[in-house]
Each structure stands twice: as structure tokens, then as C-alpha cells.
Amino acid sequence: MIIHPTENTPGTNKLSHIAFIMDGNGRWATMRGMPREYGHTIGAKVFRRVAEYCFRGGIDIVTVYAFSTENWSRPKREVDAIMNVFGSYLKMGLTDMAKDDICVRFLGEKTPFAPETRELMERLETESLGNRYKLNIAVNYGGRAEIVNAVNRLIASGAREVSEESLSSAIYTAGQPDPDLIVRCGGEVRLSNFLMWQSVYSELYFTDTLWPDLTDNEIDKAVENYYHRKRRFGKV
Ligand code: FPP
């Protein structure tokens, strides 16, 4: 069970936004003698379970890194499989997200997706707008590209210079607080171009657990670990 300290515990910042780098699907499948694509099918199921667990546990915003701008260069068969899993999720999401009071936002440019996928993504965003829990899915996402796009959008709207505030209002997560905690599965200890602007003061939690093996118990552990950190935001 996710446990938050009571509101009047001094020195704690409530964990309201958690982000996940869902790494290790391919290895998880290979270890079982299955094609990598199978790992993504299971990974998508785990993604739903994890998001629901976090929302039930009182976390308001969940962000997941599902597909990076670099992932397009994987073998076509694997990219197609991920897009299929993603497409099925979108169709299911359209019926389930409203019921579960979840507002979905996609982080990333939608132009490279097939027109029908794009349409589903836009519908899901529009139809879930205003729901209580925020679920951000980073697809075709790159942190540097996000910053460059934001600057270009500001320039196109007439800005001659940008500020931290204007840039924060032009990135994909505009209007949301930055992630308090970023959890990376799969054993690598890096951010891999994820939330470059938003992660400056995020606490980081790395685990060797492969994404499909991530249990509720390990999420509890990551949250407990977060609440033991001293967050000073550059102050003393
Ligand atoms: C990283 O594992 C995972 C991905 C690149 C794809 C993740 C996609 C999904 C979970 C499915 C679609 C998404 C949603 C939101 C429904 P990896 O393949 O890099 O694993 P490896 O490090 O073992 O090779």
C-alpha cells in the first residue's frame, strides 16, 4: 500500500507526480524464450496496473515513457508490434479512462503516427479532459526536442525571448507540477532524454527489476525511499 506521511509532517513534500521509465520489456521476453514483442504486450498490461495502483494510492499524476523519438529506428517488426499494442490501448482507453476519471495527455508530436492512431489520440485527450487523475504518456518523445519545439512555438507566437515561466507553459506538461519522483526499471542508471526540463529537482529511483516484473510492493518501496529524501531545491 502506498503510504504518504501525514500532511503536517515537517520537511516532506507530498509525492503528487510520479514518472516511470518502463525499461526491460525486450529482455524480459527474451529470458523466457519469447519474441521481444511479447514483452511489450505484457509491459502494456503492467502499465495499466501500475497507473491504477498509483492513482488509488493518492498520487495525482502518473507519467510514463512509452516510446522515444529514437525508438523508431528499432526493427520494423518491433515498432509495428509496439504501435499495435498502443493502438489497442487507445481503443480500450476511450471506454475505460472516462469511467476511471483519468485524463490522458500525450507528450510528444503526433505527426509521425498513422492518421487513425492520431485521431484516436486526439479523441482520447479531448474526451478525458478535466478528469481527476492525470496520466501522461510520452510517445514519440524526446526531452531535448520538447524544449526546442516549445521555443519554436513561442517564437511563432511572436515572442522575442523566452523565460523559465514562458517555456514551462509551452512544454507538453504545461500546467502540471514537475515529477517529484522518477522511477527507472531495467538496470540502467540514466534518464535517456526523458523530461529534461521537468526533472531538475526530481528524486531518482533506479531498480534492476525489469518493467514487466514491477510489483506494487516495489512501488511502495520507491515511495518510502522518496519520503526519506531531504528535498532542498537548492536551499539549505
Ligand atoms: C522499453 O523496453 C520499452 C519500450 C521501448 C516500449 C514500451 C511500450 C509499451 C509498454 C507498450 C505501449 C505503451 C502503452 C502506453 C500502452 P525495451 O524494449 O527497451 O527493453 P530492453 O531494454 O530489455 O531491450
Image: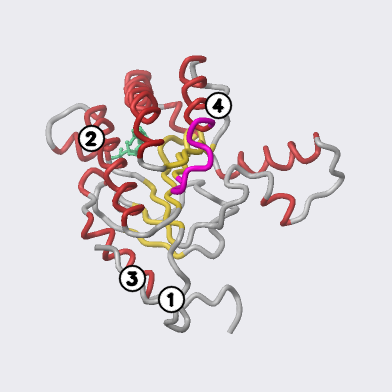
Marks 3 and 4, Cα distance to the nearest angstrom?
35 Å
From the image, state whether disc 1 or disc 2 is nearer to you: 1
The relative height of residue 43 versus residue 223 in the rendered view (above or below) is above
Residue range highlighted in magenta: 126-134
Residue at 60%, 44% (x, y): give it: 144
| Of residues 191 and 112, the one drawn nearer to the viewer in this rendering | 112
Q: Residues within 10 Å of mark 2 (few under 14, many from 20)?
A: some
Q: Are marks 1 and 3 in contact (CB under 8 Å)?
A: no
Question: Circle 2 — which element?
Answer: helix
Q: Where does residue 84 sit, x and y in percent of width and height?
A: 34, 21
Task: Give whichever of discs 3 and 4 has the lower sequence position.
Answer: 4
Marks 2 and 3, Cα distance to the nearest angstrom?
27 Å
Would you name the residue on which mark 1 appears?
A: 7
Would you name the residue on which mark 3 appears?
A: 225
Question: Circle 3 — which element?
Answer: helix
Q: Where does residue 213 sit, x and y in percent of width and height?
A: 20, 47
Q: Quadrant of residue 126?
A: top right
Q: Where does residue 165 sit, x and y in percent of width and height?
A: 72, 56
Marks 1 and 3, Cα distance to the nearest angstrom?
17 Å
Would you name the residue on which mark 2 appears?
A: 42
Task: Give whichever of discs 2 and 4 has the lower sequence position.
Answer: 2
Would you name the residue on which mark 4 appears?
A: 110
Extreme-top residue of the structure: 115
Q: Where does residue 47 sit, x and y in percent of width and height?
A: 31, 42
